Structures are given as structure tokens and as C-alpha cells.
């Protein structure tokens, strides 16, 4: 629980204001435009010594305005004499653009010509510096200019009580962010976050209590959005501070730039609601807060800034009017899509505990003898509301949420126990194939999980095959080969699933300690119509044989396909023609029947 004291906030604010200011200055983005790279590099080095970190150097002055729009720098250091577009031209354009009208521009010029300097000042230059620059002079001017800008910005753009950027800043920033999203075809989400019953807090505890609460909430929200896992890797790098705005006394606006999809906004909103709900103590009183969040997204819901603002706040009102403590997308379509996804996700979180998963088993046959060589374990979710759900509909969610790790462990253990029952003494043993997702493969406990499943069930490890897709092996291949070796050392078999669709080159296949290739169903499907598919399948089989790998054809549905594969020398087949995935009980029957009559 967080404890804050109510009153001496004036002073507190003052102190934070100063240190925040300092960070803002050294965190400023400094843009330089000069046709001599070396000059800019020298200036950058001087300024880096003074603690500045963000620089944008532009040698090609024709790019200056575009870069300015993309990066919205805090200050511009501008050369005057440049080919094509001169410093004067740029200065003129900067001052004509309402967004950059007040941006500080320091002219760096070697020209001793007084007339040029006057002209630059007339055009609105903030200050002038002679080249070659003197380092201490440079630092002083930059600092003073930034400080002056920060001061006037703060008056105009910040809420003095919470130090958060205000509504005015939000509106300008939103236009800018939207413009950028449009140009780069990125998604953007706007969250309107209102603390429920905030007016009542203000009325009963006083305005400064309200401000303190907003400050704490702002910290929590920023903490959440800073965590990269909420929004995906590309977002973590962005400076989140400016993305949260206090737009009314109890309301924040949050901008999520460059989100991969709207789903990320739902994930963020869920976490934000949790963060707001954490209790806090104010002047000895425990306070329990909730929030209502409205989400509008670009381009899914609107492309217009005014419409997006309206959509977000009316969605927020909807959330509030239906009891608060929830979030709402502004469009009905997106809403129901994400409600469904979220309910799937929460269902999946409980599914293991509630014992709702089952494995079905699909037999794999030997083309030559017709015998059942093994089975593949395929996961199904027996959800009360949705019936028996195939893995394609829920595995992606379990992968995103990491739930696949415990679920995959359950699959492996269950499959091994089942195999033990089938491979009783006296019968010809069969093998069990288990699919492994990328997330499981990256899990540091994978080897232990595999070993435990083998040991607990007592199966012979050579009858257990782990199936990996090529995507598992894309990067960091050496490390992965090491993991594969360790699995092999335990005695298991390895198979590459859906082979032919991924990135494997035949040359790297040689380096992998695998035993089997499963030729992707897409090639089998159009085997009889497409000469290309036949050529691919034939060469995969040929290659596999030269690397002493077993080939399995997946998704064999017809006699024609089966014959062609047999002809091409494929070792094993799996598909509806021979057997669909069935329950353990059903497969037990098939196994006993099959041992009497094993022709296919
Ligand atoms: P997969 O490993 O390639 O499994 C083969 C899929 O093809 C299965 O779909 C199977 O039912 C289907 N199939 C088999 N023969 C035929 C056929 O002749 N025609 C057609 N049209 N389809 C056929 P399923 O069970 O829906 O599984 C889909 C995918 O979900 C699997 O593809 C696998 O990638 C994944 N999956 C299934 N179980 C697990 C699991 O326990 N863990 C993980 N990580 N992934 C799993
Ligand atoms: Mg598979
Ligand atoms: Mg497959």
C-alpha cells in the first residue's frame, strides 16, 4: 500500500519541478542542420560532454523539414550557407509552421557578414553563434535557450500541481502523433482514463488531495506503460513521459504510439485498471479507487483527430455509466472481438486447473508395411461454453500469454503416461509425437520438464518425438542446436513439423540433430494438381534420405496422394485417409484391431 501525506505538496512540487526541469533539459532532442558533417559531430561531442544525449544530425538540408516533423526536436542548431535549401529558407519555413513557430533556433555561422546575421534575426532566429564554436559558449547558449523554452513551455503546457503535461500539450502532441502514424502507416490508440468518483474525493478531501492522488496515479500508469511487455518490444524504447496528460481534474489521456494491434491497447487498459485499484493511504485514510477507460484507435475506428477524441471520451462515459472499473473500445465490432478474446484468455488461465484439456491422438503409418508406427498428440480444449475447441483457435493466445509453457508441460506428461499404457510388454511399441511451441523451447526449464515427464511415466525415451516448427530455429541457431543436442542426449527423437514452409535451407538442416521431417500439408494437398508441389515433395524426400532422416507426409486425404507419396519413397504418412485424431480410448481400440490386420 502506498502512503502519501496530503499537504506540504507545494514545496514538494517545487523541488520536483526543478529536478524534473534538469532532466528535461539534458533529455532535450537537439537537431542540427549543416552541410558539413564534421562541424555537427564536433558540436555534438561538446554537447555530449555537457550531458545531452539526443541528437539528430542532418547533412542534407532538403530533409530538414521532414525530419523536424518526424522528430519534433526541442532546439534547432542551423547553418546558414548550404547548397539547395539554405538556413534562411529553413528558418522561414520553421516560423511559418504553427507547430514550430516558437521553437528555439540557434544559427551557427562562419559568416562574419553582419547583414546575414541581421537577416537571420529578422527571420526569427533565437540566437547566433560564430563558427568555429567555442565549447563553453555553445553549452551556455544551448542551456539558456532550452531553459527559457522549458520555462515558457511549463507555464503554457504543464499542470503545476502534478507536473503532468496539460490538455493544451495533449492536443498539440496528439495532432503530431496522429500525423506521424498516418505517414508511417502505424496504429495508434488513444486512452481516456477517468478516475471514478473523482469529484467526490475533491469535495470530501480537498483539491490538493485530488492532485496528490492524480500524481500517484500518473506514476503508476507511467510505470505500467514503461514495461515493454505490455506493449511489445518496439514501444519500450520510446519516451513514455510525454504520452500521459492530465486533461481534466480527474482525467488522463494516454497515447499509445506504434502499437502492433488494438489488442495491445486492451492489454494495457487491463493492467492500468489493476494498477489504479491498488489501495493507497492518504492522511491516514485508506482509499480504494477505480477507473473507467475509453479507447479509440487509429486507423481502425477513425482517422480524424476530433472524432477520435470524441470516441474515446464517449467510450469512457459508457464504461463509467455501466459501473466503472472497466474499459471500453469505442466501436462495437472491436469491442465484441476483444471481449471474446479476453474471455478466452481468462478461460484459458483456468483451464488447466479445471481439467478442461484433452489430448486426441492421430496415428502415423508406415508406407511400406502398413503398420502404425506411432501417434501424434493433438491438444483440444473442452470449454463448457464453446465445446471442443481445436488448437488453432487458442494456441496463439496461450503463446502470447506464456500459458503455453504450463499447458505444454501438461501435454507432454499426459502423452507420456498414455504412451506407457500403450507400450506394455509383449506388444510392438509405438512412438508418441508431441508438438513443442517456440515459447516452450525458449523456456529455461525445458530440459528438466522433458526429463521429468520421461522419468515419471517410465517410457523409453526413444519412443518420444518432439516436433518443432522451422520458426523455432530461425535465430540464435547455435544455442538452439545446443538445446536440441541435450534433448537428443536424453534419448528422445526430434522432428521438424510443417517442413517446407519456413526458412530452413537444406545446408543448415545438416547441422541440426533431427531425425524426422514432416512434409507440410500444403504440398500434399495439391500434389496431384501441381507439378511444383510434386517436385518439392520429391526433393524433400530425396534430401531427407541423403541426410538419413525419416519423412512423414502430413494431411494425406486421398488414394492418389497416398500412391504418389509411396512412389516418391516417403517413409510414413498421417492424414484423414488413414485416421483422424481420436480420443485415447478410441485409439486403444484401433491399436488392438490394427495388430490383427495391418494392411493399409
Ligand atoms: P500439426 O502439428 O501440424 O498437426 C497436424 C494438424 O493437421 C492437426 O490439426 C490435424 O488434425 C490436422 N490433420 C491431420 N491430418 C489431416 C488431413 O488429412 N487433412 C486435414 N485437413 N487436416 C489434417 P489440429 O489438431 O487442429 O492441430 C493444429 C496445430 O496445432 C498442430 O499442427 C500444431 O501445430 C498445433 N498443436 C496441436 N496440439 C498442440 C500441442 O499440444 N502443443 C502445441 N504447442 N501445439 C499444438
Ligand atoms: Mg505436429
Ligand atoms: Mg504439421
Image (tube, rainbow, N blue to C red):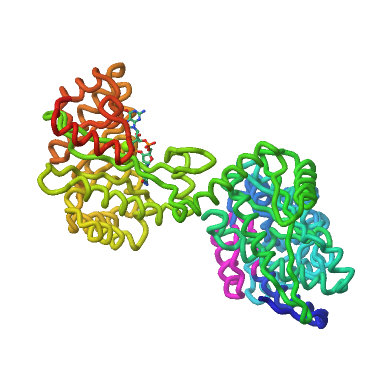
Residue 494 vs residue 285: left or right?
A: left
Q: Residue at x 70, y 77 (%)?
A: 19
Q: Position of residue 180 (x, y in %)?
A: 66, 46
- Give whichever of 219, 565 is nearer the camera: 565
Magenta stretch holds residue 122? no
> Height in image: 291 above or below 216?
above
Q: Position of residue 80 (x, y in %)?
A: 69, 55
Residue 81 vs residue 394: left or right?
A: right
Given the current orientation, which residue lies at the most extreme right position?
203
- Give whichever of 496, 187 is nearer the camera: 496
Q: Residue at x 26, y 52 (%)?
A: 417
Image quadrant holding the C terminus, namely top left
* Whether residue 117 can be seen here: no
Residue 228 vs residue 220: left or right?
A: left
Where ligand 2 lies, by image quadrant?
top left
- Give whichever of 111, 261 is nearer the camera: 261
- Give whichever of 354, 211 is nearer the camera: 354
Total marks placed: 0
Q: Residue at x 35, y 45 (%)?
A: 471
Quarter occupied by residue 146:
bottom right
Given the current orientation, which residue lies at the most extreme left position?
426
Q: Give the magenta part as a residue range.
A: 27-56
* Whether residue 586 can be seen here: yes
Q: Position of residue 97 (x, y in %)?
A: 78, 48
Magenta stretch holds residue 43? yes
Quarter occupied by residue 442:
bottom left
> Height in image: 559 above or below 325?
above
Q: Position of residue 119 (x, y in %)?
A: 80, 56
Image quadrant holding the N terminus, namely bottom right
> Height in image: 180 above or below 557?
below
Q: Residue at x 86, y 63 (%)?
A: 199
Amino acid at each position: 500500500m502506498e502512503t502519501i501525506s496530503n499537504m506540504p505538496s507545494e514545496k514538494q512540487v517545487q523541488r520536483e519541478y526543478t529536478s524534473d526541469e534538469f532532466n528535461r533539459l539534458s533529455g532535450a532532442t537537439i537537431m542540427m542542420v549543416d552541410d558539413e558533417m564534421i562541424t555537427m559531430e564536433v558540436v555534438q561531442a561538446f554537447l555530449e560532454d555537457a550531458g545531452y544525449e539526443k541528437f539528430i544530425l542532418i547533412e542534407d538540408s532538403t530533409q530538414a523539414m521532414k525530419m523536424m516533423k518526424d522528430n519534433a526536436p526541442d532546439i534547432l542548431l542551423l547553418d546558414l550557407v548550404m547548397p539547395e535549401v539554405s538556413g534562411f529558407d529553413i528558418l522561414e519555413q520553421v516560423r511559418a509552421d504553427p507547430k514550430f513557430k516558437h521553437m528555439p533556433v540557434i544559427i551557427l555561422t562562419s559568416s562574419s557578414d553582419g547583414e546575414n546575421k541581421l537577416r537571420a534575426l529578422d527571420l526569427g532566429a533565437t540566437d547566433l553563434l560564430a563558427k568555429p564554436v567555442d565549447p563553453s559558449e555553445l553549452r551556455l547558449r544551448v542551456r539558456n535557450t532550452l531553459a527559457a523554452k522549458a520555462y515558457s513551455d511549463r507555464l503554457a503546457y504543464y499542470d503545476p500541481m502534478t507536473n503532468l503535461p496539460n490538455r493544451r500539450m495533449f492536443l498539440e502532441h496528439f495532432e503530431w502523433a496522429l500525423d506521424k502514424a498516418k505517414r508511417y502507416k502505424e496504429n495508434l490508440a488513444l486512452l481516456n482514463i477517468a478516475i471514478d468518483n473523482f469529484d467526490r474525493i475533491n469535495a470530501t478531501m480537498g483539491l490538493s488531495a485530488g492532485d496528490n492522488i492524480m500524481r500517484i496515479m500518473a506514476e503508476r500508469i507511467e510505470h505500467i506503460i514503461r514495461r515493454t511487455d505490455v506493449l511489445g518490444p518496439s514501444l519500450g524504447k520510446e519516451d513514455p513521459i510525454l504520452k500521459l496528460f492530465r486533461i481534466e481534474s480527474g482525467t488522463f489521456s494516454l497515447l499509445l504510439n506504434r502499437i502492433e494491434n488494438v489488442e495491445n491497447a486492451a492489454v494495457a487498459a487491463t493492467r492500468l485498471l489493476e494498477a489504479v485499484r491498488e489501495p493507497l493511504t492518504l492522511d491516514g485514510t485508506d482509499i480504494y479507487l477505480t477507473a473507467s477507460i475509453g479507447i479509440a484507435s487509429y486507423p481502425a475506428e477513425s482517422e480524424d483527430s476530433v472524432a477520435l477524441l470524441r470516441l474515446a471520451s464517449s467510450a469512457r462515459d459508457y464504461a463509467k455509466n455501466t459501473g466503472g472499473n472497466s474499459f471500453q473500445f469505442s466501436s462495437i465490432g472491436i469491442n465484441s472481438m476483444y471481449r471474446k478474446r479476453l474471455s478466452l484468455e481468462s478461460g484459458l488461465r483456468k483451464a488447466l486447473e479445471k481439467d478442461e484439456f484433452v489430448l486426441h491422438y492421430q496415428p502415423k503409418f508406415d508406407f511400406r508395411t502398413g503398420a502404425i508406427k506411432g501417434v501424434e498428440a493433438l491438444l483440444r480444449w473442452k470449454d463448457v461454453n464453446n465445446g471442443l475447441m481445436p488448437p488453432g483457435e487458442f494456441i496463439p493466445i496461450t503463446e502470447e500469454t506464456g500459458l503455453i509453457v504450463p499447458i505444454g508441460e501438461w501435454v507432454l506428461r499426459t502423452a507420456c503416461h498414455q504412451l506407457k499404457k500403450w507400450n506394455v510388454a509383449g506388444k510392438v511399441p509405438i512412438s508418441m509425437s508431441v508438438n513443442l511451441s517456440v515459447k516452450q523451447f525458449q523456456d529455461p526449464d525445458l530440459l528438466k520438464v522433458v526429463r521429468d515427464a520421461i522419468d515419471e511415466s517410465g517410457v523409453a525415451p526413444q519412443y518420444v518425438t518432439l516436433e518443432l516448427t522451422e520458426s523455432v530455429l530461425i535465430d540464435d541457431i547455435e544455442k538452439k542446436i545446443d538445446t536440441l543436442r541435450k534433448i537428443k542426449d536424453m534419448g528422445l527423437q526430434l522432428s521438424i513439423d510443417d517442413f517446407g514452409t519456413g526458412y530452413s535451407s537444406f545446408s543448415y538442416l545438416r547441422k541440426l540433430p533431427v531425425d524426422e521431417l514432416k512434409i507440410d500439408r500444403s504440398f500434399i494437398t495439391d500434389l496431384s494438381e501441381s507439378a511444383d508441389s510434386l517436385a518439392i515433395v520429391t526433393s524433400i524426400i530425396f534430401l531427407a534420405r541423403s541426410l538419413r532422416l525419416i519423412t512423414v507426409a502430413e494431411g494425406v486425404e486421398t488414394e492418389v496422394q497416398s500412391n504418389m507419396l509411396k512412389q516418391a519413397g516417403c517413409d510414413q504418412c498421417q492424414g484423414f485417409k488413414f485416421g483422424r485424431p481420436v480420443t485415447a480410448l478410441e485409439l486403444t481400440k484401433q491399436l488392438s484391431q490394427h495388430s490383427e490386420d495391418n494392411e493399409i
